[in-house]
Amino acid sequence: MRERPRKGDRKRFFSDTPSCPHEGSGRVPERGSPIVRRLRLGQELRFLRERRNLTGAGAAKRLGWSPSKVSRIESSKTKPRAEDVTAMADLFEVDADKKRELLGLLRDAEQRGWWEDYEGHLPGEYTRLLGLEAEAVAQRDWEPQLVPGLLQTEDYAREVILATRGISRITHSGVRSRVEARLDRQKRVLFRADPPMIHMVIDESALLRRFGDASVMREQMDHLLEMTAIPHVSVRVLTLDSVHPVGTGAFIHLKFAAFDDVVYLESLYSARFVEDLELVAGYEMAFDQISSMALDEDESRSLIRRVAMQWRR
């Protein structure tokens, strides 16, 4: 368990890590994510400004911009133009190599991510999750209600999505696109060349809650067992008779090599990211507590196997 970070004690992208090999090439590497590139660009511009002892308002005044424009660029709420990045680099008196790095990040941020093919049918925060997942080196999921999306079968995923139609308007094509996006996500996260270490804890109730008919659930349990054989995937079950250590809903905790951890939360009609380091550390401790109460991997496989047999009856 790492130390609980102090508020404001944030890692920097380029101050303590070597330059990325693709910088300045205008080409996204195999695992590159435009969303992460945009976040890295904003963070680096903020670091450079702070290193010059400039406030956001002070930088905006010298650039002839509104303070909100500087804030939106640094927080990655808007994608800057090359002229904007150049103007900020000149103001911060960076050298030619650093300016090329910044412009290289901007070019990479302008590339299309695979998730953009489904953008019209997916919530905005969910597409951001897909972009962040593309570069995560580790992922920790707690799921008290469903089999996690990364481990869902096509039929189970469809039934989960159809279950929301009572409260939201999703067309037939929308359902199809969401299912396709979920399967595409699985392929690109679980089976990429350098996959993240994935640790999942699933509540036993998620294995028993029916979506579709018994054949859908039986297939899902069999698939879940197959997924536990993947070396970089750990699945553990928190049983119904366990002492539940933390009263929290589902969350996904993403870890990065050169970027601060983030936590993704979904609610009924929206989703959001937790980026404050103290809060993220709290979710990390929550996962550790939940995990400590769950069955180990072998015991979890045995339980999943028994549940699969129940769905065969």
Image (spheres, rainbow, N blue to C red):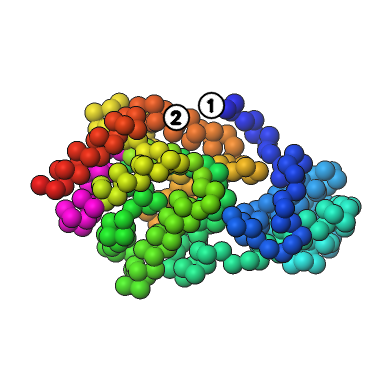
Q: Is residue 254 visible?
A: no
Q: Is residue 279 magenta?
A: no
Judging depth in this view, the residue of 205 and 7 nearest the camera is: 205
Q: Residue at x 32, y 46 (%)?
A: 226
Q: Residues within 10 Å of mark 1 (few under 14, many from 20)?
A: few
Q: Is residue 214 magenta?
A: yes
Which of the numbered marks, if any, corresponds to residue 1? 1
Residue 40 placement, left or right of 296: right
Residue behind mark 2: 288
In percent of width and height, residue 263 lies at 51, 44
Name the element at disc 1. loop
Judging depth in this view, the residue of 275 and 33 nearest the camera is: 33
Residue 261 placement, left or right of 251: right
Q: Residue at x 54, y 33 (%)?
A: 281
Q: Are marks 1 and 2 in contact (CB under 8 Å)?
A: yes
Magenta stretch, main secondary structure, is: helix
Q: Residue at x 46, y 68 (%)?
A: 118
Name the element at disc 2. helix
- In the image, residue 179 above or below residue 59: below
Which of the numbered marks, if any, corresponds to residue 52? none
What range is drawn magenta here?
Answer: 203-219
Q: Residue at x 72, y 53 (%)?
A: 21
